[in-house]
Image: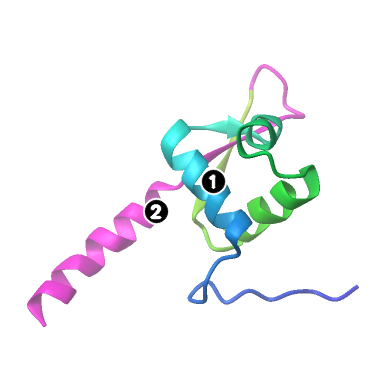
């Protein structure tokens, strides 16, 4: 099996961008809900979620109604990083 190592600084695939945008606009969703909202195939959504988790752009939240189902949400770490970098950009 070939492992794809993604540099998070590089461009995200279009599917990952769509999933990220959907999570930002719709809030926390399950994988099934993401498949329905985006119209992407289950495999494509699964791979997009994997990439976004590796880049720490999203987080998994446990679903206490059914622990087999994961809920995905936009990560606040991303916002914190961009806010922390903003003063450095402005000071240059």
Q: Measure how far apart labels 2 and 1 are at the Cα level.
A: 9 Å
Label 1 sits on residue: 59
Relative to 79, is 84 on the left or the right? Answer: left
**Which residue is drawn at the image coordinates 17% and 75% (left, top)?**
89
> What range of the chain is rendered magenta?
64-92
Q: Is residue 73 highlighted in magenta?
A: yes
Residue 55, x across and y down, in percent: 54, 63
Q: State the image quarter where residue 70 is shown.
A: top right
Residue 36, x across and y down, in percent: 67, 31
Question: If the image is split into quadrants, where does the C terminus sit?
Answer: bottom left
Mark 2 secondary-structure assignment: helix
Residue 49 visible in the snapshot: yes
**Which residue is drawn at the image coordinates 91% and 73% (left, top)?**
1
**Which residue is drawn at the image coordinates 46% and 32% (left, top)?**
27
**Nearest the eye: 90 or 67:** 90
Relative to 22, is 39 on the left or the right? Answer: right
Q: Disc 2, disc 1: CB below 8 Å?
A: yes
Residue lying furthest right in this view?
A: 1
**Which residue is drawn at the image coordinates 63% and 36% (left, top)?**
34
Label 2 sits on residue: 77
Q: Is residue 82 highlighted in magenta?
A: yes
């Amino acid at each position: 099996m070939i492992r794809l190592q993604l540099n998070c600084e590089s461009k995200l695939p279009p599917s990952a961008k769509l999933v990220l945008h959907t999570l930002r606009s719709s809030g926390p969703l399950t994988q099934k809900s993401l498949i329905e909202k985006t119209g992407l195939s289950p495999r494509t959504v699964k791979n997009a979620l994997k990439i976004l988790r590796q880049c720490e752009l999203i987080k998994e939240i446990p679903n206490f109604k059914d622990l087999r189902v994961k809920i995905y949400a936009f990560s606040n770490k991303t916002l914190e990083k961009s806010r922390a970098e903003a003063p450095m950009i402005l000071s240059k």
